[in-house]
Amino acid sequence: MEPEIAELARRVQHNCHISDARFARNYTLCIYLLKMREYYRWEKGYGFSDPLSHEAVGTWLTEREALWEEIEEQDFARLPFAGREYEPFEDAAELNRRLESSGLVYDAGLGNHGKPLFFLGQLADAGNRQEARVLVSGREIARDITAPPAMSRAGTILVRQESLRRMLWERVEEWDWHQRENAMARAMAHYPFAENTDLALDRMTANETETVILHELGELAAGDLLGPEWEEMLLNVAQTRAEHILRAVRDHLADGLCTLPSLLDRGPEASLHFYFANLVGIRGAMFPALTKAYQRWAEGGRFGELERAVAEGRDYWGGLAEELLELGDTEPEELARRVEDHTAGLLP
């Protein structure tokens, strides 16, 4: 790695450490330990199935938490490239444009609970879809404990294939523990997992790269409809149940605008099954009609019922989002309460 790129990577990783220092321990203990094991595996270059030494992981975890204690209050570092320094958030788009010709991709944004996310990776592909610039990264050079498979911001979509592949492996591994006849089993049946796991993961990653691009295109479309006020509302209720509700509403709107119509129209069928394998938690609980329509189709029912559920959901979630935007600019606690009250009938 060239010295200039190495220094850029070092500073991006330093910003990742600062973000983790401030937010990583907000997870429950179980989730925290699982994420840290996965982070250790990535950082040390271990494969998905490589055994890990409990002692080595424990030592690394202690050292990482000690580092966090040292840097938690530090400011995020500026990022050097091509003779100047860039602000990690404000200049992210400009830095990314400069990096593209060097085969690199950078991004910075805010994730769940308002956690800053930083990323540097090798650029695997670049192109345009509709009004968006789509960048696909391969090997990840710098990242934090949170590694979302895709992000979109300011008309640019970034798909992180290494993180996507890792997420898919975790879903496959989770299914393998129970081996239930469900949506995940239907999705996996389209790939040669029994014969060649790596080949199956490669093919699944290729298909799901398209799915996450579709979702992010939907996110951009939803953002155009909802405006910046939605993001402000999210930040105001960060780290509350209301934040999860708002994210689920926007996800359903985005998928109704783009992801699901595209999957229903042209497939592949494996991706449609995988979509419903991931419709869990609060998102699944808030849209039971969609899950029921899928189940009936998967068991031999009519495809039209699923199409109607998607169309009706798109209208419903768009209307609900507009209602939530009208709740008013008020104190965060009061806003969170209003969001919960307004959506109380959607959750058990």
Image: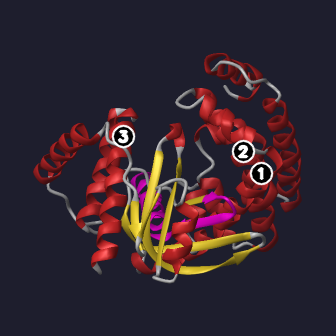
The reply, left or right, for residue 203 in relation to residue 40 is right
Question: Residue at left 40%, top 56%?
Answer: 78
Q: From the top left corner, tell me how far across and down residue 222 is, in percent.
A: 77, 51
Q: Mostly what secondary structure, the magenta segment?
A: helix
What amino acid is at disc 3? Answer: Ala
Mark number displayed over residue 222: 1
Contact check, label 3 and label 2, Cβ < 8 Å: no
| Secondary structure of residue under mark 1 | helix
Q: Is residue 92 magenta?
A: no
Mark number displayed over residue 250: 2
Most foreground residue, 141 or 36 = 141
What amino acid is at disc 1? Answer: Ala
Q: From the top left corner, tell me how far across and down residue 180 is, in percent.
A: 51, 53
Question: Residue at left 63%, top 65%?
Answer: 157
Residues in magenta? 152-178
Which residue does the numbered mark 3 point to in the structure image?
Answer: 24
Question: Residue at left 78%, top 45%?
Answer: 227
Query: In this rendering, does residue 73 appear at all?
Result: yes
Question: Residue at left 41%, top 75%?
Answer: 197
The residues tagged by marks 1 and 3 sit, at their Cα atoms, a distance apart of 29 Å
